[in-house]
Amino acid sequence: MFVECKKIPIFACLIFSMSRTRDTYTIPLQSLKEGVFDEVLEIGKEFIEAQKMEGVFDADVHAKVHFVKQKNLHTLSIVMKGTISVACDRCLDVFALPIEMSQDMVVKVGEKDDELADAENVIVIAPDETEIGLSPILYEMIMLSIPLKKVHPNEKDCNADVVSYLKQSANKKTKQETTDPRWDSLKNMFKN
Ligand SMILES: [Zn+2]
């Protein structure tokens, strides 16, 4: 939790809990006082489905959110660790891929056409913004943590039947290509 309800009026507490049921992955900027706020967010299947993450079937990820609220410039750092379920590029079985990712960001209060708006790791929010949505940031961090080639860390864990089938059909294909009669007639054409 970013705030302890005891320290803020009941009315504010109500608004806060309402906003949390709407979206867990937000920093309720308005109801926070200046200072440091830490929270651990759990990213599971619900998040994956809500964000329609292509190629990701499940997740078990913890994201440690460290937010420092100051007057006009806040800092936000997220450290993410866990596993996501993806299909192995070698055997097509779904497996738990370990991921780890961290990102430090500056949250600037300003206008959207602020020259910093396009800068990397800078989030520009309007002065009347009441919360910071973390879902797009978490989405991007997960997607960036997926390697180009995602395979079972240990080749022994791959589905042996699928791997041998794929190898066989690849061999067949190369054989077919090397003995394709069309190539022979082409070769003969060049010879003549
Ligand atoms: Zn595999």
Image: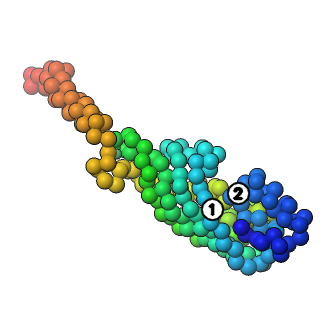
- Contact check, label 2 and label 1, Cβ < 8 Å: yes
Q: Residue at 21% of width from left, 29% of height from top?
A: 172
Counting residues from the N terminus, which is met first, the one under dot 2 or under dot 1?
2
| Quarter of the view holding residue 13 | bottom right
- Label 1 element class: strand
Asked if residue 168 is positioned above or below residue 129 in the image, the reply reads above
Asked if residue 126 is positioned above or below residue 69 in the image, the reply reads above
- Outermost residue, left direction? 192
- The front one of 89 and 174 is 89
- The front one of 118 and 137 is 137
Q: In this view, does 88 lie to the left or right of 62?
A: left
Read off the residue under disc 1. Answer: 41
- The front one of 138 and 38 is 38
Tell which quarter ligand 1 is in.
Answer: top left
Q: Is residue 64 left or right of residue 33?
A: left
Q: Residue 132: where, in percent of width, then height? A: 73, 62
